[in-house]
Image (cartoon, grey):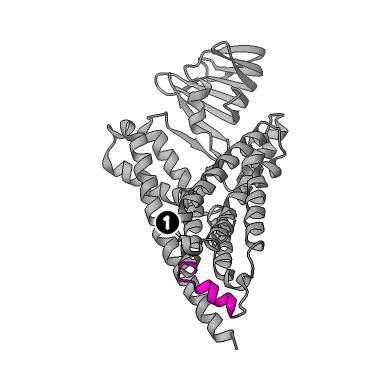
């Protein structure tokens, strides 16, 4: 007998949820662009408006990915809170309708949004982020042109008619695995080639280890001289090369996993990237966590009204963000395992939201 009324209720709640979620998303996207624009305004002064617009078009999916959980939180709060404020939830409970059945639509939609975020986070978001950050580095920061064929397979044009090929760069520690330097003559012919298995930034200089130098002789042949240690004078520092390193937000999970394997084979710590890999999934499911929190607050609004709990929701979102940042930092510092660091805030807040709902009399 309740099938038809429940279908009507489900459609009503779903419609309200999606309407509020879409409205909130647009507002938060606009705020994100405005805040980011003011933050970068001094850097954009010498750049054409077309470049700025292009950058933010590419950046929109990333902003949406970041603010969607807050939009879901408000959608769950206001869609159910509106019914609570008009005593509709109380009437349903008196009609022997379980609260757990009423909250199904926002929970299902929170789950759908989470899966959508997971899919977009593995497709559109990384590719658009890559385009945005590449455009920013080259057109705004004016770094040297470069090309990446894989995660960290880098071609970099250095100063003084030099081209660098870097197999693996760990900018944070100032170390390179697999470095080739091509030095060109004024007429752009190869004058010298340096190959090194490893290079490290020490005392303001690049120290190369275990390699060879190939010099072009007048007759067109090459003279090859091996070396164990060599100091290479390059104007580029690790922080300059860091501009061409792809961040985790520019990579899909498979690309990040491949990069972690390459770091492991090279003997470089990959803890930071393992945490980032685990966080890709947990970040997407933050939407479901926020739906739980929004539902928990909405069911407790009563006569105090939805607005009385909006501030509490904002505080909850801020607390989640702080806890998430702290947990990720502990993971990157190798204090917590990557999976624990990435998923701990989600588990804690989901448990708190579920416990709050279970305490409500149904």
Which residue is at the front of the view, 47 or 294? 294
Q: Position of residue 360 (x, y in %)?
A: 63, 64
Residue sitting at x 50%, y 52%: 313
Residue annotated with mark 1: 25
Rendered view: 245 above or below 281: above
Q: Is residue 117 magenta?
A: no
Image-quadrant location for residue 228: top right
Name the quadrant of the C terminus: bottom right
Name the quadrant of the N terminus: bottom right
Q: Which residues are magenta?
A: 84-95
Rendered view: 253 above or below 358: above
Residue that extends furthest to the front in the rendered view of this protein: 303
Mark count = 1
Give left or right: position of 141 versus 312.
left
Rendered view: 122 above or below 204: below
Residue sitting at x 50%, y 33%: 244
Main structural element of the magenta stretch: helix, strand or loop?
helix
Which residue is at the front of the view, 220 or 282? 282
Q: Position of residue 17 (x, y in %)?
A: 47, 66
Q: Position of residue 57 (x, y in %)?
A: 37, 49
Which residue is at the front of the view, 225 or 11? 11
Give left or right: position of 60 versus 282.
left
Q: Circle 1 sits in a helix, a strand or a loop, which is it?
A: helix
């Amino acid at each position: 007998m309740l099938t038809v009324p429940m279908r009507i209720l489900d459609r009503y709640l779903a419609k309200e949820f999606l309407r509020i979620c879409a409205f909130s998303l647009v507002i938060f996207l606009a705020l994100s662009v405005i805040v980011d624009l003011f933050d970068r305004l001094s850097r954009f002064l010498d750049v054409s408006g077309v470049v700025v617009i292009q950058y933010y078009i590419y950046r929109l999916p990333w902003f949406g990915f970041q603010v969607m959980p807050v939009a879901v939180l408000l959608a769950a709060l206001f869609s159910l809170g509106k019914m609570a404020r008009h005593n509709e939830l109380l009437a349903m409970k008196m009609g022997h309708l379980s609260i757990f059945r009423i909250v199904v639509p926002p929970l299902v939609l929170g789950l759908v949004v989470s899966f959508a975020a997971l899919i977009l986070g593995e497709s559109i978001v990384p590719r658009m982020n890559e385009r945005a950050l590449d455009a920013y580095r080259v057109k705004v920061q004016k770094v040297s042109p470069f090309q990446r064929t894989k995660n960290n397979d880098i071609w970099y044009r250095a100063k003084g008619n030099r081209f660098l090929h870097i197999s693996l760069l760990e900018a944070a520690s100032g170390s390179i695995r697999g470095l080739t330097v091509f030095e060109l003559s004024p007429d752009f012919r190869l004058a010298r080639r340096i190959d090194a298995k490893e290079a490290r930034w020490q005392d303001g200089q690049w120290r190369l280890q275990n390699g060879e130098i190939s010099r072009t002789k007048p007759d067109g042949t090459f003279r090859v001289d091996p070396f164990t240690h060599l100091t290479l004078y390059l104007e580029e520092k690790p922080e300059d090369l860091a501009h061409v390193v792809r961040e985790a937000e520019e990579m899909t999970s498979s690309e990040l996993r491949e990069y972690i394997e390459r770091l492991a084979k090279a003997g470089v710590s990959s803890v930071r990237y393992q945490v980032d890999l685990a966080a890709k999934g947990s970040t997407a499911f933050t939407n479901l966590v926020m739906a739980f929190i929004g539902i928990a607050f909405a069911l407790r609004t009563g006569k105090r009204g939805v607005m009385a709990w909006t501030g509490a929701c904002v505080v909850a979102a801020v607390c989640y963000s702080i806890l998430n940042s702290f947990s990720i930092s502990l993971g990157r510092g190798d204090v917590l395992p990557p999976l624990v660091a990435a998923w701990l805030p989600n588990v804690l807040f989901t448990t708190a939201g579920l416990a709050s709902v279970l305490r409500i009399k149904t």
